[in-house]
Image: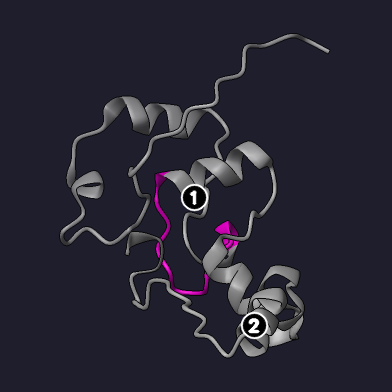
Amino acid sequence: MSKKPTVLLILDGYGLNDKKEGNAVALANTPVMDKLMAEYPFVKGQASGMAVGLPEGQMGNSEVGHLNMGAGRIVYQELTRITKEIEDGTFFENEELVKAMENAKKNNSALHIFGLLSDGGVHS
C-alpha cells in the first residue's frame, strides 16, 4: 500500500448546489476548486436535518456540523433529543423533572420551566 498524503478540507459555508441564481459559489470562477474536484475524490457532506441530529428541514450551523464530524456519528441536538423523548415517553421519566414536579405538588408550589419557543432551532 502506498502512503499518500490525505487532506481533510472543510469549507464552512461553501455549499455545493447546481442552482446558479443567487449562488455565489456556483457563479464564481473557481479554477482551483474545479481542478481539485475533477482530479481527487471528495465527499459532499450534509449540514441540516437528521443528518446532523436536527429535525428535518432545520438548517444547521458551524457548531452542529463540527460536532457531528468530530464524533463521526449523528449527535442528536437538544432540540431533537427532547422531541424524540417526548414522543417515546422517556422525557416524562426524566429523574430530575419527575423530582421537580413531585416537589411542586408536595409543597403546593409553582414549577417554572423555561426554554426557547421558536422555529429558529439552533439559531434562536
In the rendering, at what x and y percent does residue 39 appear?
A: 50, 28
Q: Residue at x 35, y 56 (%)?
A: 17
- Upstream in sequence: badge 1 or badge 2: 1
In the rendering, at what x and y percent does residue 100 appear?
A: 64, 75
Reply above or below: 46 against 63: below
In the rendering, at what x and y percent does residue 89 appear?
A: 74, 85
The answer, for residue 37, to whether it is visible in the render is yes
Furthest-top residue in view?
Answer: 3
**For the residues bearing labels 1 and 2, Cβ distance under 8 angstroms:** no
Q: Which of pointers 1 and 2 indicates the residue nearer the eye?
A: 2
Three-letter residue code for mark 2? Met
* Quadrant position of the N terminus in the picture: top right
Numbered range of the magenta stretch: 51-62
* Quadrant position of the C terminus in the picture: bottom left
Q: Is residue 9 left or right of residue 80?
A: left
Q: Is residue 105 magenta?
A: no
Q: Residue at x 60, y 73 (%)?
A: 82
